[in-house]
Image: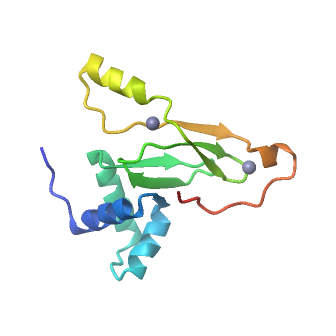
Amino acid sequence: MKSRRTRSQERLLQLLKQLNGEMSAQDLYVRLRELGQGMGLATVYRALEALRLEGVIQARTLGTGESLYSSTQKDRHHLNCIQCGRSLAIDDCPVHALEAQLSRSEGFQIFYHTLEFYGLCDRCQDGSPAPPQNHVHD
Ligand SMILES: [Zn+2]
Ligand SMILES: [Zn+2]
């Protein structure tokens, strides 16, 4: 069953696919305006939520509580510092094999999974917190 997407949803989905990275709703809102495809921030949030429920984009939460969105084609996991907000990508997906196995054994069609680690980065453990960072787009 394919649901019909609104134009806002299509624009956001295309943008996230082109980015091949991740962005917060606020940044997506700004980027769309720069592209001359501006829409209200509330519309951006609604469209992102609809796309997420459809399984074509995913959201992950930084240590600072901010959500970043990306296309579900991306299988990436991160270590998130709850103090400075740094987000370090880990190279391998440790649950890739598990996903395939669950998909087989449970007969479940899995769109994506999330796995995030939260704590203090090396700099913040030293007691001299790193300056707060803006979102890392990789
Ligand atoms: Zn830190
Ligand atoms: Zn993974």
Q: Regarding ligand 2, which quadrant of the image does it lie in?
A: top left
Which residue occupies the extreme top position in the image? Answer: 105
Residue 8 in the image: state x and y as whole percent: 27, 68
Residue 25 in the image: state x and y as whole percent: 45, 62
Which residue occupies the extreme right position in the image? Answer: 127
On the picture, is 134 further left or further right than 12? right
Which residue occupies the extreme front position in the image? Answer: 91
Q: Residue at x 41, y 63 (%)?
A: 19
Q: How many marks?
A: 0
The answer to whether 74 is drawn above or below residue 103 in the figure is: below
Colour option used: rainbow
Q: Does residue 53 appear anywhere in the picture?
A: yes
Residue 43 falls in which quadrant of the image? bottom left
Residue 112 in the image: state x and y as whole percent: 36, 39
Frontmost residue, 83 versus 19: 19
Q: Residue at x 60, y 37 (%)?
A: 117
Residue 13 in the image: state x and y as whole percent: 31, 60
Q: Residue at x 42, y 30 (%)?
A: 96
